[in-house]
Image (cartoon, helix red, strand yellow):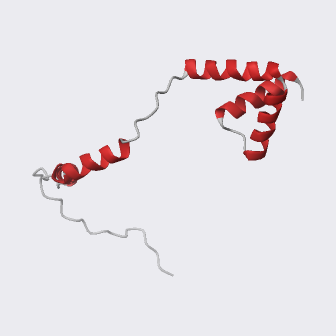
C-alpha cells in the first residue's frame, strides 16, 4: 500500500467509514508503524479542531420526554392551530367567485342549408 493509500485509509478509519475487518487492518497498520501512528494523531487533532463537537449531555432524552409530558395541551394547541390555518387557507382559495352580471345570451339562430343537394 503506497503512502497516499495509507493516508486515505487512515482518514476513512477516523471518519468511521470502514467496516470491521478493514478498520482492524488499519488499526494494526497504525500500531506497527510509529510514523503512521503520529500521522493518525495529527489527523485526529485536525479533525477535532476543524469540527469541535462537544459531547452531548446524557440526560437529553429524559429532558425531552419531561418537557413533552409537561405540556401536552400546548402540543395539541399547536396541531389544532396548524389544522385551522390549513382549513382557512383552503376555504379562501377554493371559495366560489361571484359571477359578474352580464347581458343575456343571444337567441340561437336557426341553421339554414342553402346549397344542400341531396341525391
Residue 24 sits above or below residue 36 on the image: below
Residue at x 31%, y 68% (from the top left corner): 111
Residue ranking furthest to the bottom: 119
Q: Inspect this view and state whether residue 73 appears.
A: yes
Q: In this view, does 1 lie above or below 98?
A: above
x, y percentage for residue 35?
Answer: 81, 18
Does 35 sit left or right of 2 as displayed?
A: left
- In the image shown, does 70 or 87 lie closer to the viewer? 70
Would you place residue 69 above or below residue 55 in this image? below
Identify the residue at horizontal 84%, vertical 24% (top origin): 33
Specify the quadrant of the image occupied by residue 25: top right
Residue located 41% across and 40% down the image:
58
Q: Position of residue 47 (x, y in %)?
A: 61, 22
Residue 90 visible: no
**Image coordinates for residue 75, horizontal then vertical, percent:** 21, 50
Q: Which residue lies furthest to the left in this view?
A: 101
* Residue located 23% across and 52% down the image: 69
Of 92 and 73, which appears nearest the observer? 73
Amino acid at each position: 500500500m503506497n503512502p497516499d493509500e495509507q493516508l486515505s485509509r487512515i482518514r476513512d478509519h477516523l471518519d468511521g467509514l470502514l467496516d470491521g475487518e478493514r478498520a482492524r487492518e488499519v488499526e494494526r497498520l497504525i500500531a506497527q508503524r510509529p510514523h503512521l501512528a503520529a500521522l493518525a494523531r495529527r489527523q485526529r487533532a485536525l479533525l477535532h479542531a476543524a469540527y469541535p463537537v462537544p459531547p452531548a449531555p446524557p440526560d437529553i432524552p429524559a429532558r425531552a420526554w419531561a418537557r413533552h409530558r409537561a405540556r401536552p395541551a400546548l402540543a395539541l394547541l399547536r396541531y389544532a392551530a396548524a389544522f385551522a390555518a390549513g382549513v382557512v387557507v383552503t376555504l379562501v382559495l377554493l371559495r366560489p367567485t361571484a359571477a359578474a352580471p352580464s347581458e343575456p345570451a343571444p337567441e340561437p339562430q336557426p341553421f339554414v342549408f342553402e346549397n344542400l343537394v341531396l341525391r
